[in-house]
Image: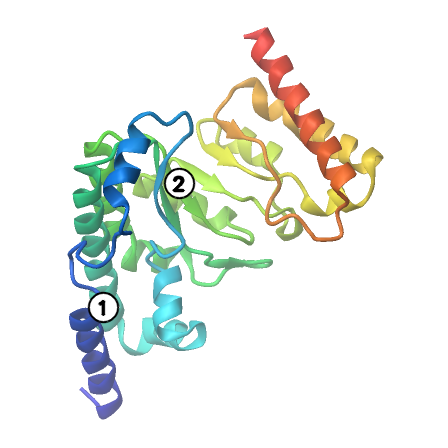
Amino acid sequence: MGERASRSWDDWERLKAERLRQTLEGRLPADWKEQVELYKSRDYPLFIGGPYNGLFGTLTDLFGREKLLYLYYDEPRLVKAVIDYLADFWIALHDQILNEVTVDAASIWEDMCGKNGPLISPKLVREFMLPAYQKMTAFYRDRGIRIIMLDSDGDIRPLIPVWLEAGITCLYPFEVNAGMDIVEIRKAYPKLQMVGGLDKTKLAAGRQAIEAELEAKVPFMLKDGAYWPTVDGNVDPEVSWEDFCYYRNRLDEMIMATAGRK
């Protein structure tokens, strides 16, 4: 092992000891007990996981994207060790939380694709991440969670089969600017749970553009369920409040019309 590799391993061991202990001590808000009581009577969905709960996204934050992509080839043992530890880390923390709270869905954040496709190949995802994903999704299913979501921007199409094999049930946000067409993906994967896929740029293009976007996608997607209609990212600041309200009201009308037919 070279000096550079040894330093990377030393950094990882130090980070585990300092920041990644498998305990909730010091991680919960001061009013946690009060929040647990409120959750028992909630009328909204509750998720576990989120922005830092990933096997690519989290490593990107730890190493930096460019360095991480080199590490898959230069130090594969280190990458696998980090991924395996993080999977166990998330499971240990979430197991403790789920002893106190019931949730409706689990969320994993990755952002591992760009406009032109994945940043790493499906082969590498299978080799490095698939066993850890399967461990995590098996844990969530054992705890009664049936909706397991994964968030990645970009063109995710080459990775969808791998994620389904991993036990992921739901993907989002289906970024239109990266070529994501939710109607075509629904046809290819009729059982896939889906969130997003409405072009956020149309909200700034006027009501005619909003209407066309909704009509082209929402009725078809709502027909068989397993779809949460929303835009494919943060709403742009140039969208007027009036146009945003128009979008939301028309979307609500379509949802209610579909519910009335069932």
Q: Residue at x 77, y 30 (%)?
A: 211
Quarter the C terminus occupies? top right
Number of numbered discs overlaid on the protein picture: 2
Q: Is residue 262 above or below residue 94?
A: above
> Where is mark 1, residue-wise?
19
Decide which of tag 1 and tag 2 comes sooner along the chain.
Answer: 1
At mark 1, the secondary structure is helix
Q: Residue at x 60, y 49 (%)?
A: 234
Residue 71 at what x, y percent from top left? 33, 75
Q: Residue pushed farthest bottom?
A: 3
On screen, residue 136 versus residue 121, left or right, reads left
Residue 62 at what x, y percent from top left? 34, 71
> Where is mark 2, residue-wise?
149
Depth check: 118 or 96 in front? 96
Quarter the N terminus occupies? bottom left
On screen, residue 50 versus residue 262, left or right, reads left
Q: Residue at x 59, y 26 (%)?
A: 221
**Crowd tier of the residue under label 2, counting other residues whose Cα lies within 10 Å: few below 14, some 14–19, many 20 or above:** many
Foreground label between 1 and 2 = 1
At mark 2, the secondary structure is strand
Q: Residue at x 20, y 66 (%)?
A: 81
